[in-house]
Image: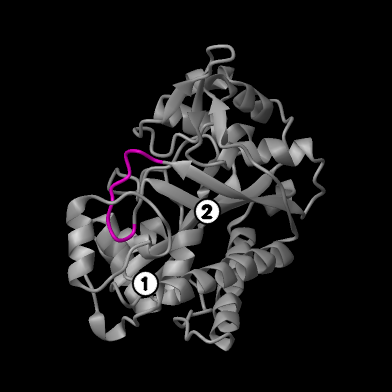
C-alpha cells in the first residue's frame, strides 16, 4: 500500500461522517441538474431469468439465495447497468432526460485493498438519447459535465470547512489503443497510472474490445456498453499516488452492437433473455449511462488513504493491522 503521509490530513471520525454526507448530498444534486436526471428507487435483487444481472467481466460469482415464499433463487445485483435502461421505458422518460439511483451491491470476488471492497456503493444513472447522439463527441460532452459536478462539489465542501483535494477540470481524452501505443511495454493498470499522474483527470475511451495486441484494455460485459463508445474516468489520488477510477460509463448497445459483442464473447445464448430480446426488437430507448463510485468520490475529495475510511465494510486482520500502524482509522 502506497501512502504519502505528508499529504494525509488526520480527521476526527465524526467530522469525517459530516463531510461524507455533504459530498454525497451535493454531488447527486449537481449530477441531477447537469444531466437532467430524476431520482428513482432501484432493486437490490434480480432473478437470473430476467437477464438484468450485470456479469461484469464474466467471471465473478454472484451472491444468491432462495426465497421462502416460492423457492425461487434470486441474485444480489452487481450493478444496475441493464435495469436502468428498462426503467427508462417504464417511467416513459423523455429524450435528453434520465434517472439516477443509489446502487448498493455485493461483489464477493473483488479483492480487498485500499481501493476495493466487497461492498459497492455508487450512483447509477441513465439518460435517453437519440440515434444521432451515439458518438464519441456526445460521450465526451457528458464526461465533462460529470467532472464539473465533481469539481464544484469539492469547492462547496471546501467552503464548508474542509480543504478538499484539487480536481483538474480539464479532461484528457485518450483511446485505449492510443494509450497502448504510448506505453507498449506496460500492462493496462501501469498505463492508467502513468497517464493519470501526468494529466490528473483522464477518460480512456474504448474498453472491452480487443486492441492491436490482441487483448482488451479491460474486460466489460458484452450486453450493455458499446465497446467503441464507452470508457473509464480516472483521477489522480495524491495521498496514494494512484489512478483512482471514479466511473465506468458509456453509450449503451443498440441491437447491432449487442449482437456483435455477444458473438465476439461467445454469449449468444443470452439473446433468449427478456432484456436482450427487448434491445434486439427496439423496444427500449437508446441511452447513455454509468456508475459513479460514492465511496471513491469521498476518498478523492477528502484525501483518504483507504476506502474503509469512508464506508463500513469487512476487512481482514492484516488490513486492520496495517491501517492501525499508519494511523488510518477505518469505519
Cα separation between marks 1 and 2: 17 Å
Residue 132 at what x, y percent from top left? 72, 51
Q: Residues within 10 Å of mark 1 (few under 14, many from 20)?
A: many
Magenta span includes 113 = yes
Residue 191 at what x, y percent from top left? 29, 63
- In the picture as drawn, the residue positioned furthest to the top comes out as 70
Left or right: where 160 falls relative to 211 = right
1 or 2: mark nearer the eye: 1
Left or right: where 136 falls relative to 36 = left
Quarter placement of the C terminus: bottom left
Q: Residues within 10 Å of mark 2 (few under 14, many from 20)?
A: many
Q: How many marks?
A: 2
**Residue for point 37% across, 65% down:** 309
Q: Main secondary structure of the magenta part?
A: loop
Dot 2 corresponds to which residue? 122
Viewer-closest of 168 and 53: 53
Give the secondary structure at mark 2: strand
Is any part of residue 302 visible from this angle?
A: yes
Left or right: where 307 falls relative to 125 = left
Boundaries of the magenta span: 107-115
Residue 304 at what x, y percent from top left? 37, 72
Say which mark, if any, is on residue 130.
none
Give the secondary structure at mark 1: loop
Viewer-closest of 241 and 260: 241
Residue 157 at what x, y percent from top left? 56, 80
Viewer-closest of 2 and 67: 67
**Residue for point 41% across, 25% down:** 266
Quarter placement of the N terminus: bottom left
Say which mark, if any, is on residue 304.
1
Is any part of residue 1 visible from this angle?
A: no
**Quarter of the figure with residue 273:** top right
Amino acid at each position: 500500500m502506497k501512502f504519502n503521509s505528508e499529504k494525509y490530513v488526520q480527521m476526527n471520525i465524526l467530522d469525517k461522517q459530516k463531510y461524507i454526507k455533504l459530498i454525497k448530498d451535493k454531488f447527486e444534486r449537481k449530477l441531477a441538474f447537469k444531466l437532467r436526471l430524476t431520482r428513482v428507487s432501484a432493486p437490490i435483487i434480480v432473478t437470473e431469468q430476467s437477464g438484468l444481472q450485470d456479469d461484469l467481466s464474466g467471471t465473478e460469482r454472484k451472491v444468491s439465495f432462495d426465497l421462502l415464499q416460492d423457492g425461487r433463487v434470486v441474485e444480489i445485483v452487481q450493478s444496475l447497468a441493464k435495469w436502468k435502461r428498462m426503467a427508462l421505458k417504464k417511467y416513459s422518460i423523455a429524450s435528453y432526460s434520465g434517472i439516477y439511483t443509489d446502487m448498493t451491491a455485493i461483489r464477493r470476488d473483488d479483492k480487498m485493498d485500499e481501493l476495493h471492497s466487497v461492498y459497492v456503493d455508487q450512483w447509477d444513472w441513465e439518460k435517453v438519447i437519440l440515434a444521432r447522439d451515439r458518438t464519441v463527441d456526445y460521450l465526451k460532452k457528458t464526461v465533462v459535465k460529470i467532472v464539473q459536478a465533481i469539481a464544484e462539489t469539492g469547492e462547496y465542501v471546501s467552503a464548508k470547512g474542509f480543504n478538499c483535494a484539487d480536481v483538474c477540470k480539464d479532461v484528457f481524452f485518450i483511446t485505449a489503443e492510443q494509450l497502448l501505443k504510448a506505453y507498449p511495454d506496460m500492462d493496462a493498470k501501469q498505463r492508467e497510472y502513468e497517464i493519470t499522474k501526468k494529466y490528473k483527470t483522464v477518460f480512456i475511451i474504448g474498453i472491452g474490445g480487443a486492441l492491436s495486441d490482441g487483448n482488451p484494455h479491460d474486460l466489460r460485459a458484452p450486453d450493455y456498453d458499446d465497446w467503441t463508445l464507452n470508457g473509464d474516468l480516472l483521477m489522480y489520488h495524491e495521498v496514494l499516488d494512484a489512478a483512482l477510477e471514479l466511473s465506468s460509463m458509456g453509450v449503451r448497445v443498440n441491437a447491432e452492437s449487442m449482437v456483435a459483442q455477444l458473438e465476439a464473447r461467445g454469449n449468444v445464448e443470452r439473446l433468449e433473455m427478456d432484456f436482450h430480446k427487448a434491445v434486439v426488437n427496439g423496444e427500449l430507448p437508446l441511452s447513455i449511462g454509468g456508475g459513479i463510485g460514492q465511496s471513491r468520490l469521498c476518498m478523492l475529495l477528502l484525501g483518504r488513504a483507504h476506502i474503509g475510511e469512508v464506508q463500513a465494510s469487512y476487512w481482514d486482520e492484516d488490513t486492520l493491522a496495517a491501517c492501525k500502524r499508519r494511523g488510518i482509522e477505518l469505519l
